[in-house]
Image (cartoon, grey):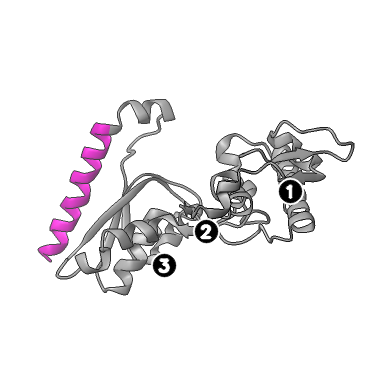
Amino acid sequence: MCNVKFFDKNGRELEGTGAELEKVSHIDISSLDERIKNTKITVMCDVKNPLCGENGCTYTFGMQKGGTPEILDRLENGMCNFRDVIKKELGIDADIQGAGAAGGLGAALMVFLNGKLKSGIETVLDLCCFDQRLKDVDLVVTGEGRTDWQSCFGKVVQGVGDHCKKNGVPAVALVGSMGKNATDIFEHGICSMITIVTDTITLEEALAHADESYLDGARRLFRFIKTGMNI
């Protein structure tokens, strides 16, 4: 990235793959573009996860990307080594909130480009004056592809729900599916959620019929809302 080079303990330049994170021993930033020093970079992160640990990028998102337990353990060791070398050579704590976004890209942008990490959903909500728009609103409908425990680390549904909760506006979610600890999102202002999947199908089938499934899910959701209005 921008002429940053990574070397192992024998001085061999590394290729920059996940498998080589555990081999990083030295980081050379001497060829960084000088213009970066005078450039303000804002990094919009959709999650708050740190780089390493139980809630870090590897163990939070690695499995959904196809990582086996053995691969995840190795990637985590590599991430920890990467973090430690950054701290040792550059004096920067790369394991802060948001550093684990996009597989650790948040940390890289912060360390090497002096990027300022900001919550993506909070930035968007601020730009569209979301809190002001909630005035006189009776209900907010939000959603995402899959709601699970990861959703509570700063994703859209949590951000929208938290702002609705703060402003006393109920919010519901229409989601593709629900996974582990999906109902944790109820602590963040989401009153309930409905999934669009109504049968046991493959991911390929779900994607192929996404439009009609979302339409059907929305109709069921609003029928529930209408029923509640008549109670």
Q: Residue 191 got which mark? A: none
Q: Amino acid at mark 3?
A: Glu
Upstream in sequence: badge 3 or badge 1: 1
Give how far across and how far down residue 36 sits, in percent.
56, 49
Question: Marks 1 and 3: in contact by CB < 8 Å?
Answer: no
Q: Amino acid at mark 2?
A: Lys
Judge left or right: residue 48 versus residue 86. Answer: left
| Circle 1 Cα neighbour tier, 10 Å, few/some/many (<14 / 14–19 / ≥20) | many
Which is more toward the observer, 41 or 154? 41
Upstream in sequence: badge 2 or badge 3: 2
Q: Is residue 153 visible?
A: no
Q: Is residue 5 visible?
A: yes
Give how far across and how far down residue 161 sits, in percent.
34, 63
Residue found 12% across the figure and 66% down from its top: 231
Residue found 28% across the figure and 58% down from its top: 172
Secondary element at image label 1? helix
Task: Provide the residue designation for mark 3.
Answer: 187
**Res 115 → quadrant:** bottom right
Secondary element at image label 2? strand
Task: Provide the residue designation for mark 2.
Answer: 116
Q: Is residue 132 magenta?
A: no
Residue extent of the magenta highlight: 211-231
Residue found 54% across the figure and 45% down from its top: 102
Q: Is residue 226 magenta?
A: yes
Task: Provide the residue designation for mark 1.
Answer: 82
Which is more toward the observer, 73 or 100? 100
Question: Marks 3 and 2: in contact by CB < 8 Å?
Answer: no
Q: Is residue 21 above or below residue 110?
A: above
Measured Cα–Cα span from mark 3 to mark 1: 34 Å
